Image: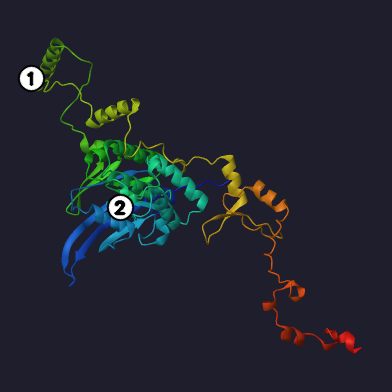
């Protein structure tokens, strides 16, 4: 029996196992925009180096003009770097094979206004060549997840900005991506939607997805990311985990139950005595809940009272295909006895050699109804309309419809009316 070993790159020069390679690796990445005469106009990204690993939620922070959107476009292959090296899934960003593994939510989602939510998701699913059965199932799950199942047949042009943002999140997940890039995902969302998006990002990271989150709302990033970089002027000004970057090492916080004034005074006296009077209790306050927690509590109370709202509803659980749940027995049987038609994207029954293909059955047809129609007698055709008759015309036909000369020329002379007289 052979034992598999994994080597890493370094002094020994060994190869890195595929599962240990970073999803994104950037080294001295630079992007300079030039004018018509190729003169440098702006250096949006200036020699940045960072890695994004599998199952990691990575934050990309910075003020406007710091290079966040340009970095995302470089990762997607929409822009080509001026210098440096950038690898996505071990390949160049321009490699088409990487596109099916990426889901992207841009800062501004430009959707077709005449399509409804269901048609929009079906359009994007067809771009990834998903068969009809998979498209239908995923669309149902995503619409329920983002809270728009009740408004799925309304045109997108009638959606509010927050509702359109929810559809944008759904379309970024329709292909079940390995890498999800979210550029300002909570823009236009109310606190409920914001909380749902953050919970979704955490759940996706827990399920093995890699997420890049770019946002101006620092509190949103702080709640979900594992590691982050802070950009300014196209350069990385800070990098690390949330705890490593945010923790204050010159202060100590002690949280207890409510204390009376005498106990606080004794604690302060003890601190002064132990430190020689250099340190003391600087602040005594009661902990505060976040405004988000207060807001969500009020909304939950209103929902408990069954108050109605015209906006987007509370989203459901994470879609099953994003949770990577095992398929049930019936789904497995359907998948084994059916095969995909790569030309149309529809699922068709598997063809058995030597057996003629049956004509396609109309969608929604009832087998029992069809069988009863096949076995029934054919209906009697309607009788032809009566021909007007004239009593004085031969054969009962109207005299005006009969040309005797034409009839006589067509008849054999021996079969004519005078044939018997001649013999």
Near-viewer residue (110 or 66)? 110
Which residue is denoted by mark 2 in the rendering? 109
Q: Secondary structure at mark 2?
A: loop
Is 364 drawn above or below residue 418 in the view shown? Answer: above
- Give how far across and how far down residue 409 sits, in percent: 75, 88
Is 382 drawn above or below residue 59 in the view shown? Answer: below
**Left or right, 305 with reference to 373:** left
- Give how far across and how far down residue 412 sits, in percent: 82, 86
The residue located at (89%, 89%) in the rendering is 422
Pointer 2 or 1: first along the chain: 2
**Left or right, 327 with reference to 93:** right
Label 1 neighbour load within 10 Å: few <14, some 14-19, many 20+: few
- Give how far across and how far down residue 77 sits, in percent: 33, 60
Q: Quarter of the image holding residue 306?
A: top left
Q: Which mark is residue 67?
A: none
Q: Which mark is residue 277?
A: 1
> On the rendered image, what quadrant is the C terminus found in?
bottom right
Q: Secondary structure at mark 1?
A: loop
């Amino acid at each position: 029996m052979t034992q598999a070993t994994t080597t890493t790159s370094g002094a020994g020069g060994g190869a890195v196992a595929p599962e240990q390679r970073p999803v994104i690796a950037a080294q001295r990445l630079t992007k300079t925009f030039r004018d018509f005469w190729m003169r440098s106009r702006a250096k949006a990204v200036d020699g940045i180096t960072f890695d994004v690993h599998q199952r990691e939620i990575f934050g990309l922070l910075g003020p406007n003009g710091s290079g966040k959107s340009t970095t995302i476009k470089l990762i997607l292959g929409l822009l080509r770097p001026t210098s440096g090296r950038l690898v996505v899934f071990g390949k160049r960003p321009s490699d088409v094979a990487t596109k099916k593994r990426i889901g992207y939510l841009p800062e501004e989602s430009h959707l077709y206004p005449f399509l409804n939510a269901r048609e929009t998701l079906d359009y994007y699913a067809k771009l990834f060549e998903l068969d009809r059965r998979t498209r239908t199932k995923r669309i149902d799950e995503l619409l329920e997840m983002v809270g728009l199942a009740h408004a799925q047949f309304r045109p997108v042009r009638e959606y509010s900005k927050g509702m359109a943002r929810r559809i944008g999140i759904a379309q970024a997940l329709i292909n079940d991506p390995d890498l999800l890039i979210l550029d300002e995902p909570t823009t236009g969302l109310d606190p409920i939607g914001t909380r749902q998006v953050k919970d979704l990002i955490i759940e996706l990271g827990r399920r093995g997805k890699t997420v890049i989150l770019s946002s101006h709302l620092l509190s949103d990033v702080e709640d979900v990311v594992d590691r982050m970089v802070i950009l300014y002027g196209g350069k990385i000004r800070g990098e690390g985990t949330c705890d490593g970057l945010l923790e204050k090492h010159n202060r100590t916080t002690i949280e207890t139950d409510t204390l009376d004034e005498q106990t606080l005074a004794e604690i302060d006296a003890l601190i002064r005595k132990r430190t020689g009077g250099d340190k003391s209790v600087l602040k005594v306050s009661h902990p505060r809940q976040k405004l988000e927690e207060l807001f969500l509590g009020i909304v939950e109370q209103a929902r408990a009272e069954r108050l109605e709202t015209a906006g987007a509803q509370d989203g459901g659980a994470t879609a099953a295909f994003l949770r990577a749940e095992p398929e049930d027995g019936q789904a497995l049987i359907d998948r084994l006895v059916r095969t995909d038609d790569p030309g149309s994207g529809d699922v068709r029954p598997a063809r058995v050699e030597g057996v003629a293909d049956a004509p396609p059955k109309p969608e929604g047809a009832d087998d029992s109804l069809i069988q009863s129609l096949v076995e029934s007698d054919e209906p009697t055709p309607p009788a032809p309309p009566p021909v007007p008759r004239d009593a004085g015309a031969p054969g009962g036909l109207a005299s005006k419809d009969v040309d005797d000369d034409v009839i006589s020329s067509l008849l054999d002379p021996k079969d004519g009316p005078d044939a018997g007289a001649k013999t």
